[in-house]
Image (cartoon, rainbow, N blue to C red):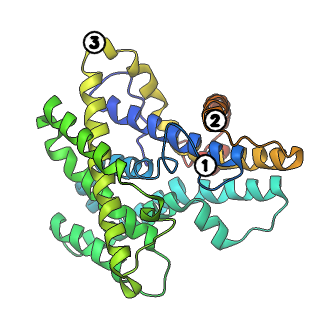
Amino acid sequence: MEQNVVKYTAGRLAYLDFCKVLAIYLVTFAHCAQQLCGEKFPHLLVSKDSFISINMAIFMIASGFVLNMEKIKATPTKEYILQKACRLLIPMAVWYLVICLVTFSVPQFNAFWSLYWYLGSLFVCLTLIKLLLNVFSNVKLVCVLSVLILMCIPMISFERSFYMIPFLWVGYGLRQFIGRIGWKTVVALLLVYSLLYYFWDISYSIYVTPFHIWNADAHTVIALLFRFLIGTIGGTGIICLLRLMMDCSAFSWMTPLANYGPYTLGFYTMSFVLNAILVRILWHTNWFISTPGLLDIASLVVTTLMMVLMYYIQKILERNAVTSLLFLGVSKK
């Protein structure tokens, strides 16, 4: 979800922005379905367990894809960490306070970090990579050390950061050879993903089976390996598929949608506010949808309306330097 502020109306990275738009739509759709049915894991026809096997992995792979190690090395540590804090931590904190206001709840750090765990994990991963690059020039060594460090830190709830950092490195590695991946490889990847998805179970989710080396057992190790495998194969397959599709004139309609890629961080943070409002309305009216099929349609409609609303809200917020920084993490110079 970390992205450049440049809009790609054309060019080789348009597929990456389109991929982020697709992924944030799936995330928002899953969250809407949760609110509309009043259950953590809704029973949908189009997805098993709310796309958990793939959605956040796609974001992290896309974030790793655009990593520039030379630029990270050259940037002073304080400046780099401050940049990432402004881009990731400030918006998640500000939007969390907005949620507290609309829900009349008292802010709590655990709730704040848990709600926006993806952005927190991305900040932890990028900060760790920067600190290691200050010491070691070998990127492969930094890759191994960053994974091991997050795996071995005791008594701190970094399980989700450890879950995400391998996907970050997958994205960084994918950039090196994505140009050599053709249709046959993409089809093979998606077929393998479909097979793995058939065996996917909610018990493999990071939400149900977090991994920590100090209390790991056979089941958690299997869950760790399975969710990494399915996320890597599925995420890589989808990104490469979109790249090939956007190179074809028949799919030229996809290119304008890539322009919404730079707004995905705002879509992510803001959607929790809208969902908080939605769930209060639903609980007040006691109106929930639990019928599969009807829930899918309702979630599709609500998600689309939310995305349109969030886009226009962001367009308003980005006009002012203060609101752009606080709510979107974008500094207007």
Mark 1 and mark 2 in contact? Answer it, CB < 8 Å. yes
> Amino acid under label 2?
Ser
Mark toward the start of the polypeptide (1 vs 2): 1
Identity of the residue furthest to the top in this view? 250
Horizontal side of 126 relative to 317 (left or right) equals: left
Q: Is residue 195 above or below residue 123?
A: above
Q: What whole-number distance in Å separates the C-alpha atoms at marks 1 and 2?
A: 11 Å
- Dot 1: few (<14), some (14–19), or many (≥20) neighbours within 10 Å? many
Query: Can you tell which of label 1 and label 3 is closer to the viewer?
Result: 1
Among the 4 quarters of the image, the one containing residue 107: bottom right
Q: Which residue is mark 1?
A: 42
Q: Which residue is mark 2?
A: 299
Q: Residue at x 58, y 39 (%)?
A: 29
Q: Which label sits on residue 249?
A: 3
Horizontal side of 263 relative to 228 (left or right) equals: right
Q: Residue at x 39, y 36 (%)?
A: 19
Query: Can you tell which of label 2 and label 3 is closer to the viewer?
Result: 2
Identity of the residue furthest to the left in this view? 180
Residue 23 location (% of width, % of height): 45, 40
